[in-house]
Image: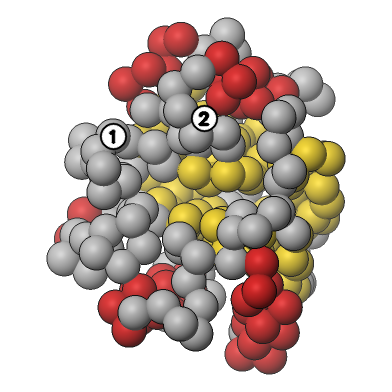
Amino acid sequence: MRIASFNVEKNGKSSTLDKQTQVDFFIHNCCSSNYWNADIVFLCEIHSAQIDNYRSNLAAIYQNYSVYSFTGGYSNAYIVMVKSFEALQVCSQGSLLGLNRDLIAVEAHGVGGYTGYVFLAHFKSGQNGLTRSQLKSCTALGGRWVATGDLNLDYQNVGQLDTAGLAYECWGGQQTQSKGGILDWVLASVDVTVTVVDLTGLGHVFDMSGPDHRPILFDVTG
């Protein structure tokens, strides 16, 4: 099963053309069977004023996908797109501890060789105990699981997690946020196989000059 995630940094009609172009390019490639063909697409940090436009526009363009929107304060709404013909169920797990945005769970049943959960969120900014606690909450259901999105914990600090899982970074050691650090990566239970899709050849496109993050793309089986 293929999963894509991108912090689009409040992209909307008032955004720069560079930002809009990067986001449109990402979504088009994710949702095209001739390109990346993602089963799940997660977009976070969408401006609250744009969330309804995002959902309705993407649903009209990409009719093979079910498009879900979740509010999250002034600029932290989510869009989750899943292939409508696959056995994928999307629901909120409630607000993340200390934040007004949710932890999203997607339950997959035999999709692309994967059965288990995918947890998606824009976790708490800062390398602190609250961020680590939020990531630990993803494992509460047990079984096979994957957590991704804007994890907001630097990949180099993964050893601080009190969570039984393995970490995978997706940009060959390059930073994924313009201010530095690898904040967008994958945490998965030990019985899940994660295979990163290499996007480093598109570093000139996703150069953090539009959205201040880089997207990630990876496959899971298990």
In the rendered structure, which disc, 1 or 2, sits on the residue that comes first in sequence?
1
Q: Amino acid at mark 1?
A: Gly
User: Is any part of residue 193 visible from this angle?
Assistant: no
- For this rendering, which residue is in front, 189 or 110? 189
Mark 2 residue element: strand
Q: Is residue 101 left or right of residue 185?
A: right
Q: Position of residue 40 (x, y in %)?
A: 61, 59
Q: Is residue 161 left or right of residue 52?
A: left
Q: How far separated are the C-alphas under marks 1 and 2?
A: 16 Å
Looking at the image, is 144 positioned above or below residue 217? above
Mark 1 residue element: loop
Kindly give the residue lying farthest to the bottom in the view shown: 60
- What's the residue at 74%, 66% (across, down)? 69
Q: Amino acid at mark 2?
A: Leu
- What's the residue at 56%, 33% (across, down)? 124
Quadrant for residue 82, please give it.
bottom right
User: Is any part of residue 80 visible from this angle?
Assistant: yes
Q: Which residue is mark 2?
A: 187
The tag on residue 181 is: 1
- What's the residue at 24%, 64% (across, down)? 209
